Amino acid sequence: MTFRTLLALAAVSLSAGGAFADDPVKIGYINKMGDHPWFVAEVGGAKLAAKKLGVDLKTQDVQFDANLTITTFDTMVGDGVKAIAIVVPDRALGPVIAEKAQKAGIALIAVDDDIAFKDGSPVPYIGMNAFNIGKQVGAEIARIFKAEGWDKDMASVRVASIEDQKADTCMRRNKGAQAAFLEALPAFPAGQIISVPYDNTMVNAIDVMSTTLTANPGVKKWIFWSCNDDGVLGGVRATENAGIDPANVIGVGIDGSRSCEAYPSGKPTGFRGTMWLKSAKEGETAVQLLYAAVKEGKPLPMISYQEAVLINAANWQDNKAAIGCK
């Protein structure tokens, strides 16, 4: 039975129960890293939509804990939620979560990280096209690379692809960045691209890049791309700690959340830009779509992509309020 069929049946069941017709729709929202600015804004958007729609929204931060994710999901279902939006801490949980939702007869939407059933059938998804947003990053880095004449001395350049290698979504972003970069600069030696594993946090990105810098003392210029702003700004911070001139660093992030830290001082920075997505809009859209599915029987769209906007030092002041910088 498809999710759309389940949603239609759930909606009919709900509307048929006249005694419950006026009860608020109960929706769950599970996210993997609730103290990160991206997810703070995302859940904030979900709460705003819930307030407008009269939704009883249950939220939970699971802090990358797979067991807590499963427990939270089961608890929410037991508490009577009719739908759940989830940012999984690990895409490997996808088939488990999808099956649980199907058995419970509730609507499910994946946010930020796409997931699927065991047979590969996708769960409705809100977020970014991971490979394409990576390509935007790679293209912007290549543009700066050429504009600043780095193509005149490629031997002195290394690229650090800062990767959460257990996260498929992250790897697709990085692969997209590499594809666009090499497409724009076919003469750049692919062997000068270094894979640097990290745990998706800025603190760890600083640590692993500090080690990488020490292991490559002869490199004069560094390029960074990563899953998110944390990876890129962490790499940039490592170069700052090592005394490397910001003019010799090109890093472009994804999500926009760390632009609030990179640009307020007005000082030169190797954090040259970020592909900003409005995470609050993702949370808001998730709740709106789930509400319409439960209350009105509307099928969930299988894909709801967000478009990215380049934020850099030149336009940050004009966009900081929208980004959520204080």
Image (cartoon, rainbow, N blue to C red):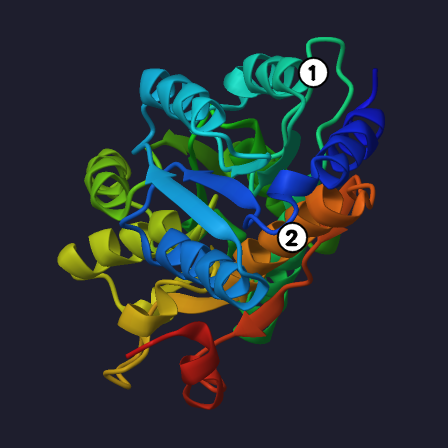
Task: Tell which residue pokes out farthest to the front in this image.
Answer: 19
Q: Residue drawn at (55%, 32%), measured in percent from left and top? A: 171
The spot of residue 59 in percent (x, y) is 39, 43
Please state if 104 lies on the left or on the right of 121 as rendered: left
Quarter of the rendering containing residue 105: top right
Please state if 315 lies on the left or on the right of 289 as rendered: left
Please state if 136 lies on the left or on the right of 203 as rendered: right
Q: Which residue is mark 1?
A: 117
Q: Residues within 10 Å of mark 1 (few under 14, many from 20)?
A: some
In the foreground, 237 or 114: 114
Q: Please, what secondary structure does the residue beneath circle 1 have?
A: loop
Quadrant that contains the N terminus: top right
Q: Which residue is mark 2?
A: 133
Q: Residues within 10 Å of mark 2 (few under 14, many from 20)?
A: many
> Which amino acid does the dot numbered 1 rest on?
Phe
Measure the C-alpha gap from mark 2 to mark 1.
25 Å
